[in-house]
C-alpha cells in the first residue's frame, strides 16, 4: 500500500516524462489479484491521471516505453477522450504529430506477419483511434488519406489486411453509427468524400481478390466489401467483374459465408429496374451453385440440428439472402417459365429453412413471409376498389373498365402462381404457431404441465406477427385454411398425430384467425372444432392430457364471442364446461377457467339475463342459486374474478328491481359474514384484532371491489350498506397500526400483522376509489361519500407516522377531483392542509424513499391544477413556492413516470398562469428558474425519455417572452446595472450565458447561433425540436449512446396510423379486443 501511495505522488507530477515502470506497476495492481484496498487505490490513481488535462501529452512516451498491453490500453483511453471532446481545440502541430505517430505505429506493426499476429489487439485499438481522428480531420485537413492508405496497402499483404480493417471501421462509423454521434452536416460531408474516392478502394479490392492466395487477406477483403456494398455507387457492382468474382468464391467452403453475406447486401439494394437483367442472371447462377452445395432433397432442419457452427451460419445467411432478394426483386423472377421454376425452388428452400428449430432463423423467415403474404393480400383486397388498384400499379385515373379487368386478371394470375407455396405456408404457420398471452398452461423442461409463471415477450411478439400472417393467408383462401386445420384436428382424434405440442399449435392457430371468416363459414367450422375438442376431452385419459385439452378448449371459445352470442346452446355448454374446470385442481386450469369466464361474459353479458328458449329463468338466476357450490374449490383471487364476471351480467339487466335483487343474491355470502363480524365487534372491539378476522375482512372488501369494478353506478345500494361501518374499521385499524409502530419502532411496520392491517386500509381506499371512478358523474354520489371521509381518511393521513401513511389516499382524492372537477374547489384547502406539507417532507429527502407516494402525490397535484386551478391561486406565496419546488423536484427524477407527470403538470401550470391576472407576478418569480432547470435535465442523458416535454416547455417559455405578454421586467433591477430594452433580449442574453458556462467545450459563436436559432424556430415545433437534437449531439453530451428516445414522438404517430390500417381488415384486431357493446343485443 505504502509503495502505491508513493507511486501516486510521483505519477502526479506530469512536468517531466512519466515513470512508465511505475505506471505499469499501478495498472498491474488494478488488474491484479491483490487485496481489495490495493485495487481501489490503483483505481483512484488511474482515475486521477485520466482526468488530468495534460496527461494526454505523455501518451506517446508511454506507448514507446511499455511492453504491457493493459498500460497501452490505458494510454489509448486517455487519448480517445481528448480526440472525442477536445481535438478541435488543440494546436495544429500537436494534432499533426499525434496523427503521424499513430499512422506510423500501425504501419510498423502491420508490416510483418509475426508482429501483426502477436500485437493484434493493440493494432485493432490503434485502428479505432485512427478512425476517431479521421472523423475530425478528413476530408478537409487530411485530403490524401485514402490515396495514402491504398498505396501503403500495395506494399505488403499484412498491411493490406489491416487497411481493409480500417476501411471497414470507417464505413461503419459514417454509415451505421453516425445518427446522434455527428451533426447532419458532418455525416453528409463524410458520405460524399467516401463516395468520390471509392474508385481507388474498389480497384484495391478487385486486385486482392484476383491476385492474392492468402486466406486471411481474402476474408478481410470480403468482410470490408460487405460493409461497403450497401452504399457504394451501383456501377462499381454491376458494371465491373465484382459479382462474377463473388459468385466464383461462393462454392469455396472457407469463403462461403462471407461471400453469401456480400451477395445478400447486393440482393437488398433496390434502385428501380435498371439492373434487372443482372439480378436475374445472378439469381439463376446462384441457384445452380446452391444445388451443388445443398441438394434440394436435404432435410434442412435435421442438417441444421447436427451441423457445425459454420454450417448453421450458412443456413442463417441463406435465409437472409433469399428474404433480401425476394423483398426487392421477386417480381423480376415472375417473367419467364425458367425464372419461375428457379423462384419456386428458392421458395421451397426457404419454407424448409423456416422449419429449422432456431428462433433467430425463424424470425428472419417469418418477417419475409409476413411481407409477401401482405402484398398478395392487399392486391386481392383492393380488387374490389379499382381506384386503389390503379394507384398501386402506378396508373393515372380514370381507368377504363376493361383495364381494371386486365389488372384483375394479372392479380389473379399472381395469386395462382403462389397458391402452392401459400398452402405450404399455412401448414408451417399452423405447425409453429406461437403461444398467445391468454394461455396460462405450459410444459416445463421436465415435460410436466404447469402454470406459466413468467410472460415471454419474444413469444408474444412472434405470436402477433404469425397471427397477422395467418389471417392474410386465411383471407387469400378460406377453404384451404379450414381444410388444413380440420384435417390436422382429425389426426389428433385418431391419435396418429397426437402430442401436446401439435394440439397446442393447432388450437392457437384456430383461435388466432377469429373474425377473418364470413359468419356462416365460421359457424360451420367452429361447430366441428368445438365438438371435436369436447370429444377429445372425453376419450383422452391422464390428468396432464386433460389439462392441455382443457386449456385449448378455453382458449378457442374465448376467441370467438360472435359465434357464442349466436348459439345459446353452445354458450351454455361452454360456460357449464368452465364451471366443471373450476373444480379441476390441476395447476393453471382454474385460473384459466375464471379468466375465460370473465372474457366470455364481457362479450355476451346480455345473453345471460334474458330467458332463453327452452329455459324457465335467466341463466344468471340459475347461476346465483348454485353459486356456493360453483366457487367451492376456488382460491380467493379466483373467486374475486368470478364475482367480477357476475357483476358484468347483472350490469346488463335493464330492470332496476331485478338488478338490485340479483346484486343482493350475489353479495349474500360476503354480506352475511360482514354482518357477523361487525355484530361481534359491537360487543367487543378486540374481536377485530384477530388475524383470521382481519383476513376475512380483507377478503370481503376485495370481493366488493371486484363487483364494483364491473357494476359501476349500480353498486350504490351495496356500498351504502357497508360504507360507514367500513370507515369505522378503517379508523380503528389505523390507530392499531400507529400504536404498533410507536411501540415497536421502525421494524414494526414490516411485521406480517401490520402488513395485514395496512392491506385492509388499502383495500378500503381502493374500493371507494373504484366505485367513485366507475360510477357515472352524479353530484349527489359525491356529496354522499366525500364529506364522511374527510376526517377518517384525510385527517388520519395527516395524523399518522410517515411509515403508516397509505399512498392510496392520494390517488383516491386525485380520482375524486378528476371526477367531480370544479365542484371540489372548496375542499382543496382541506386536502392541501392534510396531505401537502407532510407528504413533501417524506419524498424530498432523496429520490428513493416512498416511491408509491411520489407518483400519486404528483398525480393529485396535477388533478388540482387541471380542475381546481383557482384554489392554487389562493395559496400563500410560501405555499406556491412549495408547489413549484415540488414540481421541479418531480421532473428531476430519473424515474420516468414521475418525471413525466411533473413535466405535464408544469405545462398545465404555465398555461393556466399565463391566462390569469397573476401572469407577470408568477413568471417574474419562476421564469428563469424553470428555464435553467429544464436545460439541466434536457442536457442530462438520464432524462432522455422526457425530451418531447422538455421541448414543449422551452417552446412555451420562448413564445411567451417574444409575445410581449409579460409587461414587467424579468431581471432584477437591483443587481442588473443597465435596463434591457425588453424581456426577449434579456432572455436571449441570459440563455447564451447559461449555456456558455455549462458547455465550456463549445465556442461562443456556436452557443449564440443555437440560441438565436431557438428564438427563430419557436413557432415551428418540428424545426425547433431538430435544432435542439443537433445541439445535444454537438455539445457532446449525447454520443455513443442509444438516442431513440429523442425520436419517440414520431414513432408513436406511426403506430396510430398502423392501428387504423389494421381496423380496416376483418380479423386483424381480434374480436375480443374490439369494444363491441352494440353487437351483444
Image (cartoon, grey):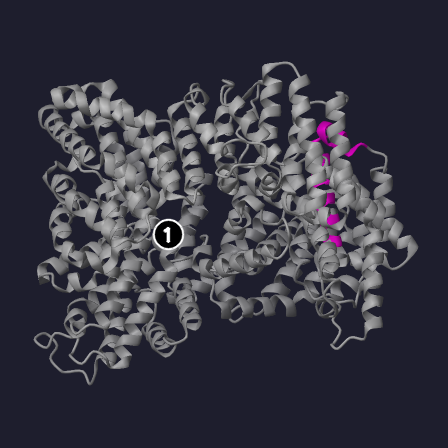
On screen, residue 611 above or below 375? above
Image location of residue 689, percent across then percent down:
17, 21
- The image quarter containing residue 719 is top left
Of residues 577 and 101, the one nearer the viewer is 577
> Which residue appears at 78% of the width and 38% of the height?
483
- The image quarter containing residue 724 is top left
> Which residue appears at 52% of the width and 33% of the height?
596
On screen, residue 877 above or below 532? below
Which residue is denoted by mark 1 in the rendering? Answer: 58
Image location of residue 416, percent across then percent down:
84, 52
Of residues 202 and 882, the one nearer the viewer is 882
What is the chief secondary structure element of the magenta stretch?
A: helix
Q: Is residue 254 visible?
A: no
304 inside magenta stretch: yes
Q: Is residue 616 visible?
A: yes
Secondary structure found at label 1: helix
Of residues 222 and 166, the one nearer the viewer is 222
Relative to 222, is 913 on the left or the right?
A: left
Q: Residue furthest top?
A: 542
Image location of residue 769, percent across then percent down:
28, 43
Label tally: 1
Relative to 80, is 874 on the left or the right?
A: left
User: Magenta segment, which residues?
Assistant: 299-326
On screen, residue 448 above or below 938? above
Q: Residue furthest bottom?
A: 981
Image location of residue 940, percent across then percent down:
33, 56
Give the position of the N terminus as an image quadrant: top left
Alpha-carbon neighbours of circle 1 within 10 Å: few (<14), some, or many (≥20)?
some
Relative to 401, is 98 on the left or the right?
A: left
Relative to 1025, is 410 on the left or the right?
A: right
Amino acid at each position: 500500500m505504502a509503495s502505491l501511495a508513493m507511486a501516486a505522488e510521483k505519477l502526479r507530477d506530469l512536468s517531466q516524462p512519466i515513470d512508465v515502470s511505475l505506471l505499469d506497476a499501478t495498472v498491474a495492481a488494478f488488474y491484479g489479484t491483490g487485496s481489495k484496498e490495493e485495487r481501489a487505490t490503483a483505481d483512484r490513481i488511474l482515475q486521477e491521471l485520466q482526468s488530468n488535462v495534460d496527461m494526454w501529452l505523455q501518451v506517446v512516451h508511454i506507448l514507446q516505453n511499455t511492453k504491457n498491453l493493459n498500460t497501452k490500453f490505458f494510454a489509448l483511453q486517455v487519448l480517445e477522450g481528448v480526440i472525442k471532446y477536445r481535438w478541435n481545440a488543440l494546436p495544429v502541430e500537436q494534432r499533426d504529430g499525434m496523427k503521424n505517430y499513430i499512422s506510423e505505429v500501425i504501419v510498423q506493426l502491420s508490416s510483418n506477419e509475426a508482429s501483426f499476429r502477436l500485437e493484434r489487439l493493440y493494432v485493432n485499438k490503434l485502428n479505432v483511434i485512427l478512425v476517431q481522428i479521421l472523423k475530425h480531420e478528413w476530408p478537409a485537413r487530411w485530403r490524401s488519406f485514402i490515396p495514402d492508405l491504398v498505396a501503403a496497402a500495395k506494399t505488403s499483404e499484412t498491411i493490406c489486411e489491416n487497411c481493409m480493417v480500417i476501411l471497414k471501421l470507417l464505413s461503419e462509423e459514417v454509415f451505421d453509427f453516425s445518427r446522434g454521434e455527428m451533426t447532419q452536416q458532418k455525416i453528409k460531408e463524410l458520405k460524399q468524400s467516401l463516395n468520390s474516392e471509392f474508385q481507388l478502394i474498389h480497384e484495391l479490392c478487385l486486385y486482392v481478390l484476383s491476385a492474392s492466395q492468402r486466406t486471411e487477406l481474402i476474408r478481410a477483403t470480403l468482410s470490408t466489401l460487405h460493409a461497403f456494398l450497401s452504399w457504394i455507387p451501383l456501377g462499381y457492382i454491376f458494371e465491373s467483374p465484382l459479382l462474377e468474382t463473388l459468385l466464383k468464391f461462393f462454392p469455396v467452403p472457407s469463403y462461403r459465408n462471407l461471400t453469401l453475406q456480400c451477395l445478400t447486401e447486393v440482393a437488398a439494394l433496390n434502385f428501380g429496374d435498371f439492373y434487372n437483367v443482372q439480378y436475374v442472371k445472378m439469381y439463376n447462377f446462384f441457384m445452380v451453385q446452391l444445388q451443388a452445395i445443398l441438394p434440394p432433397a436435404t432435410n434442412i432442419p435435421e442438417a441444421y440440428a447436427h451441423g457445425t457452427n459454420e454450417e448453421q451460419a450458412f443456413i442463417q445467411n441463406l435465409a437472409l439472402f433469399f428474404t433480401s432478394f425476394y423483398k426487392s426483386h421477386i417480381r423480376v423472377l415472375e417473367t419467364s417459365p425458367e425464372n419461375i421454376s428457379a423462384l419456386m425452388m428458392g421458395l421451397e428452400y426457404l419454407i424448409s429453412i423456416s422449419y429449422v428449430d432456431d428462433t433467430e432463423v425463424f424470425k428472419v423467415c417469418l418477417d419475409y413471409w409476413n411481407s409477401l403474404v401482405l402484398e398478395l393480400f392487399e392486391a386481392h383486397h383492393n380488387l374490389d376498389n379499382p381506384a386503389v388498384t390503379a394507384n398501386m400499379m402506378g396508373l393515372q385515373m380514370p381507368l377504363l373498365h376493361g383495364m381494371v379487368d386486365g389488372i384483375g386478371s394479372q392479380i389473379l394470375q399472381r395469386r395462382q402462381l403462389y397458391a402452392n407455396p401459400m398452402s405450404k405456408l399455412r401448414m408451417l404457420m399452423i405447425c409453429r404457431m406461437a403461444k398467445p398471452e391468454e394461455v396460462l398452461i405450459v410444459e416445463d423442461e421436465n415435460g410436466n404441465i404447469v402454470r406459466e409463471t413468467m410472460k415471454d415477450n419474444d413469444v408474444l411478439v412472434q405470436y402477433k406477427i404469425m397471427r397477422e400472417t395467418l389471417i392474410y393467408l386465411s383471407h387469400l383462401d378460406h377453404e384451404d385454411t379450414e381444410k388444413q386445420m380440420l384435417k390436422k384436428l382429425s389426426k389428433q382424434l385418431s391419435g396418429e398425430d397426437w402430442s401436446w405440442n401439435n394440439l397446442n399449435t393447432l388450437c392457437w392457430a384456430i383461435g388466432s384467425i377469429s373474425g377473418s371468416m364470413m359468419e356462416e363459414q365460421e359457424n360451420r367450422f367452429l361447430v366441428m372444432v368445438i365438438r371435436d375438442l369436447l370429444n377429445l376431452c372425453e376419450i383422452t385419459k391422464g390428468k396432464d392430457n386433460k389439462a392441455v385439452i382443457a386449456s385449448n378448449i378455453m382458449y378457442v371459445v374465448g376467441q370467438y364471442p360472435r359465434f357464442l352470442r349466436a348459439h345459446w346452446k353452445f354458450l351454455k355448454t361452454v360456460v357449464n364446461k368452465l364451471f366443471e374446470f373450476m373444480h379441476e385442481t390441476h395447476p393453471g386450469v382454474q385460473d384459466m377457467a375464471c379468466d375465460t369466464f370473465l372474457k366470455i361474459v364481457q362479450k355476451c353479458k346480455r345473453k345471460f339475463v334474458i330467458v332463453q328458449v327452452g329455459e324457465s329463468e335467466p341463466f344468471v338466476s340459475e347461476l346465483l342459486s348454485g353459486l356456493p357450490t360453483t366457487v367451492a374449490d376456488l382460491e380467493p383471487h379466483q373467486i374475486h374474478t368470478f364475482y367480477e364476471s357476475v357483476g358484468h351480467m347483472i350490469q346488463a339487466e335493464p330492470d332496476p328491481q331485478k338488478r338490485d335483487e340479483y346484486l343482493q343474491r350475489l353479495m349474500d355470502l360476503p354480506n352475511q359474514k360482514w354482518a357477523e363480524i361487525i355484530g361481534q365487534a359491537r360487543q367487543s372491539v378486540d374481536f377485530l384484532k384477530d388475524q383470521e378476522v382481519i383476513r376475512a375482512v380483507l377478503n370481503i372488501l376485495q370481493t366488493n371491489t371486484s363487483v364494483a369494478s364491473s357494476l359501476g353506478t349500480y353498486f350504490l345500494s351495496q356500498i351504502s350498506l357497508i360504507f360507514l361501518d367500513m370507515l369505522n374499521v378503517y379508523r380503528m385499524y389505523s390507530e392499531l397500526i400507529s400504536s404498533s409502530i410507536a411501540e415497536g419502532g421502525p421494524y414494526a411496520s414490516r411485521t406480517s400483522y401490520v402488513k395485514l392491517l395496512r392491506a385492509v386500509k388499502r383495500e378500503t381506499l381502493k374500493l371507494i376509489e373504484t366505485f367513485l371512478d366507475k360510477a357515472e358523474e352524479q353530484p349527489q354520489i359525491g356529496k354522499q361519500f366525500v364529506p364522511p371521509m374527510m376526517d377518517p381518511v384525510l385527517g388520519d393521513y395527516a395524523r399518522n407516522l410517515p411509515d403508516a401513511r397509505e399512498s392510496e389516499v392520494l390517488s383516491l382524492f386525485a380520482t375524486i377531483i378528476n371526477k367531480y372537477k370544479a365542484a371540489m374547489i372548496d375542499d382543496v384547502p382541506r386536502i392541501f392542509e392534510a396531505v401537502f406539507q407532510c407528504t413533501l417532507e417524506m419524498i424530498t429527502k432523496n429520490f428513493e424513499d416512498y416511491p408509491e407516494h411520489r407518483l400519486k402525490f404528483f398525480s393529485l397535484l396535477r388533478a388540482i391544477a387541471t380542475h381546481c386551478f383557482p384554489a392554487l391561486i389562493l395559496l400563500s406565496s410560501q405555499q406556491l413556492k412549495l408547489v413549484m419546488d415540488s414540481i421541479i423536484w418531480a421532473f428531476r427524477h430519473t424515474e420516468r413516470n414521475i418525471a413525466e407527470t411533473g413535466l405535464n403538470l408544469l405545462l398545465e401550470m404555465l398555461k393556466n398562469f399565463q391566462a390569469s391576472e397573476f401572469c407577470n407576478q408568477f413568471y417574474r418569480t419562476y421564469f428563469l428558474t424553470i428555464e435553467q432547470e429544464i436545460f439541466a435535465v434536457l442536457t442530462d442523458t438520464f432524462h432522455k425519455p422526457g425530451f418531447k416535454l422538455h421541448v414543449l416547455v422551452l417552446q412555451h417559455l420562448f413564445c411567451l417572452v417574444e409575445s410581449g405578454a409579460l409587461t414587467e421586467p424579468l431581471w432584477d433591477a437591483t443587481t442588473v446595472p443597465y435596463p434591457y430594452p425588453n424581456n426577449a433580449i434579456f432572455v436571449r442574453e441570459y440563455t447564451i450565458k447559461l449555456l456558455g458556462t455549462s458547455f465550456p467545450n463549445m465556442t461562443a459563436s456556436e452557443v449564440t447561433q443555437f440560441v438565436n436559432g431557438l428564438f427563430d424556430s419557436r413557432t415551428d415545433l418540428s424545426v425547433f425540436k431538430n435544432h435542439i437534437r443537433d445541439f445535444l449531439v454537438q455539445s457532446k453530451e449525447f454520443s455513443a449512446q442509444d438516442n431513440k428516445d429523442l425520436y419517440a414522438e414520431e414513432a408513436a404517430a406511426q403506430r396510430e396510423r398502423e392501428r387504423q390500417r389494421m381496423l380496416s381488415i376483418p380479423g386483424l384486431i381480434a374480436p375480443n379486443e374490439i369494444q363491441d357493446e352494440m353487437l351483444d343485443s
